[in-house]
Amino acid sequence: MAAERQLAAYNARDLDAFAACFAPDVEVYEFPGVLAIKGQDAFRTRYAERFKSEGLEAIAVHRAVIGDRVIDHERVWLNGRAASEPTDLVVIYTVRDGLIARVDFIKEGRPS
């Protein structure tokens, strides 16, 4: 499952394995529907920077699969458990042809 593979690659900070889980025309949205990333080049650029954090970690607290969507409640530590507070978010992955084509993030707090 693409959602499981991308989470493992995210935690390993393996950019190539991570990006391989996403469609070439991937779109990433921040609630409420604000386009934040479009396409693999922008996607790789954003996550190359994020993967520089050695303490980066994410877990799926709960997962539901409904048709072509995977809905995760995720908990993320951007700088490791000892150095940062976790952020809780809901992530909706839309899968097309075995790759994640769209990601929708709903973060704690006010919409951005």
Image (cartoon, grey):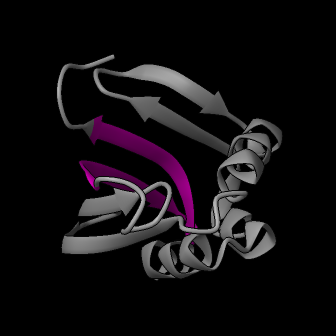
Residue 55 against residue 34 in the figure, above or below: below
Residue 16 against residue 69 in the figure, above or below: below
Q: Which residues make up the magenta segment?
A: 86-106
Q: What residue do we see at 62% from left, 31% from top?
A: 37
Q: Please tell me which residue lies in front, 23 or 37.
A: 37
Q: How many marks?
A: 0
- Per the image, is 105 magenta? yes
Q: Can you say which quadrant of the picture contains the C terminus? A: top left
Q: Please tell me which residue lies in front, 29 or 82.
A: 82
| Whole-percent x, y for residue 60 in the image | 28, 73
Image position of 27 (left or right of 105): right
| Whole-percent x, y for residue 9 in the image | 61, 77
Q: What residue do we see at 38% from left, 54% from top?
A: 84
Residue 41 against residue 70 in the figure, above or below: above
Q: What residue do we see at 79% from left, 42% from top?
A: 45
Q: What residue do we see at 35% from left, 63% from top?
A: 68
| Whole-percent x, y for residue 15 in the image | 76, 66
Quick check: can you spot residue 96? yes
Quick check: can you spot residue 72? no
Residue 105 against residue 6 in the figure, above or below: above
> Which residue is outermost to the front?
82
Q: Quadrant of residue 23?
A: bottom right
Image position of 22 (left or right of 74): right
Image position of 45 (left or right of 92): right
| Whole-percent x, y for residue 39 in the image | 73, 38
Q: Please tell me which residue lies in front, 2 or 91.
A: 91
- Per the image, is 18 magenta? no
Magenta stretch: helix, strand or loop mostly: strand
